[in-house]
Image (cartoon, grey):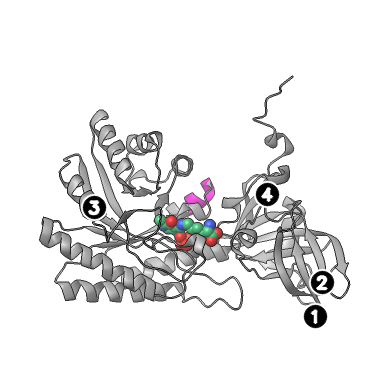
């Protein structure tokens, strides 16, 4: 172990690189557990009944979902593939919720047949599909109604979801939510657990969540008086922001819950409603800061008086976020963490595309080819959004915990890339 090397979860990152190669995703499992426990503990302290569901789109793999299961979380899946992964991981099916704005009949069938805990119904087409399926399978289903509360959270446009002009959910203002509820209450095979709203992602302020809570409780109040319907569950979605760089100032995870639970208690009391079970669906805030990507530095190019490009052996194929959302990251040279920062360089990926830049203007020690770069907070929407662009095989994923490392997703081989190709002669 060298003191000039970055350590992750008590393990020398350069030893991990020697063992597993690069690019490599390394997750500090203790950090994942701490993040999950921060949410759970704060809800427990609030006295409000709750479920914390891990939004598996942030990073889904069998090992990850086993950790979520060990932490007694529930699970949010958005596709048959995520559901399949959960079942392979032995995740308790009654604690799985399924999302999606265009769930297929196949997806819904699989979800119902495996006995999924709940389906978050998004639109009228889905109600029709479900109606036919529960009839055909002679069964019942528990649902939440996803509503768009008309809140504009402050985040990147592509990851905004709660505003009225959105592809997700039933619109509150045009009474779509009322129509959906009335329809479902007349269907004896449906049990409507309550409502769901997700206002966006990477949100630092609690104001948006508080506004959503007020809108949702207004709706519950209206439903109680209009339809004598009492919701058992209010799901507030995910979206709790994390720190990528020094300029990000998220709240500590427990603070998000403290604010939400206070607001819920106040709203319930004001309207004379009983407090329903509160569900949240954090993804990024569970795994984001637990993940680090390790790369090998290859070519260096200096554009005189402009900038120095430092290329790594990955890029937009393992982290699309800078190219897609102009997302910013912090990084260090993993084999020189105590060396003085004397250069300013820009980190380029290796795809044939100028937009494949991971970090602009990063302060580093003197860099040479063969050094290693560690990019922090890549645990969410990194591996999950990885692609095969330029036919790069996907990276490996390693978990570290208690001074031990374990490979949890194998590195792809070139033969994996042509596995489904058929010849045409
Ligand atoms: N629940 C629902 C219904 C969602 O749509 C999402 C994220 C979550 C929960 C989890 O949100 P989180 O806690 O992870 O912010 N690819 C983007 C993020 C898109 C998120 C989509 N939905 C990114 O890399 O920033």
- The residue that label 2 is drawn on is 307
- The residue that label 3 is drawn on is 193
Would you say 348 lies left or right of 394 here? right
How many neighbours does mark 3 have within 10 angstroms: few (below 14), some (14-19), or many (20 or more)?
many
Mark sitting earlier along the chain (1/3): 3
1 or 3: mark nearer the eye: 3
Residue 63 shown in magenta: yes
- 197, 281: nearer the viewer: 197
How far apart are the alpha carbons under marks 1 and 3? 57 Å
Asked whether the viewer can see residue 194, the reply is yes
How many neighbours does mark 1 have within 10 angstroms: few (below 14), some (14-19), or many (20 or more)?
few
3 or 4: mark nearer the eye: 3
Asked if the residues shown at circle 2 and circle 4 are in contact, with their CB atoms under 8 angstroms apart, the answer is no
Mark sitting earlier along the chain (1/2): 2
Which residues are the magenta region?
62-67
How far apart are the alpha carbons under marks 4 and 1? 30 Å
Q: Which mark is residue 395?
A: 4
User: What percent of the width, then of the height, locates residue 208?
Assistant: 38, 72
């Amino acid at each position: 172990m060298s003191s000039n090397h970055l350590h992750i979860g008590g393990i020398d990152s350069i030893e991990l690189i020697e063992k597993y190669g690069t690019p490599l995703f390394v997750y500090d499992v203790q950090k994942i557990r701490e993040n999950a426990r921060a949410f759970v503990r704060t809800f427990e302290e609030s006295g409000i009944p709750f479920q914390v569901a891990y939004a598996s789109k942030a990073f889904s793999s069998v090992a990850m979902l086993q950790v979520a299961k060990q932490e007694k979380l529930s699970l949010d899946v958005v596709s048959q593939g995520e559901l399949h992964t959960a079942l392979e991981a032995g995740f308790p099916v009654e604690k799985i919720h399924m999302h999606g704005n265009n769930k297929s009949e196949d997806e819904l069938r699989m979800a119902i047949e495996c006995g999924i805990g709940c389906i978050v119904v998004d639109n009228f087409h889905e109600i029709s599909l479900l109606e036919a399926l529960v009839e055909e399978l002679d069964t019942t289903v528990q649902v939440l109604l996803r509503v768009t509360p008309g809140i504009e959270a402050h985040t990147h446009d592509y990851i905004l979801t709660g505003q009225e002009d959105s592809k997700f959910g039933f619109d509150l203002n045009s009474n779509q939510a009322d129509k959906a509820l009335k329809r479902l209450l007349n269907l004896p095979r449906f049990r409507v657990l309550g409502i769901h709203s997700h206002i966006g992602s990477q949100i630092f302020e609690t104001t948006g969540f508080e506004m959503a809570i007020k809108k949702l409780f207004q709706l519950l109040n209206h439903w109680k008086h209009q339809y004598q319907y009492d919701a058992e569950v209010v799901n507030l979605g995910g979206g709790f922001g994390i720190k990528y760089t020094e300029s990000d100032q998220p709240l500590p995870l427990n603070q998000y819950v403290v604010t939400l639970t206070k607001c819920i208690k106040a709203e319930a009391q004001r309207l004379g409603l009983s407090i329903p079970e509160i569900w949240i669906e954090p993804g990024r805030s569970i795994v984001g800061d637990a993940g680090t990507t390790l790369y090998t530095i290859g070519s260096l190019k200096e554009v005189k008086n402009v900038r120095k490009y430092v290329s790594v052996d990955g890029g937009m194929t393992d982290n699309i976020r800078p190219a897609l959302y102009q997302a910013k990251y912090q990084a260090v040279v993993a084999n020189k963490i105590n060396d003085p920062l004397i250069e300013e360089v820009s980190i380029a990926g290796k795809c044939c595309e100028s937009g494949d830049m991971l970090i602009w203007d990063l302060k580093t020690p003197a860099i040479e080819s063969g050094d290693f770069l560690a990019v922090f907070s890549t645990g969410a929407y990194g591996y999950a959004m990885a692609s095969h662009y330029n036919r790069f095989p996907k990276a490996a994923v390693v978990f570290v915990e208690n001074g031990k490392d374990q490979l949890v997703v194998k590195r792809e081989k070139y033969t994996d890339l042509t596995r489904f190709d058929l010849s045409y002669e």
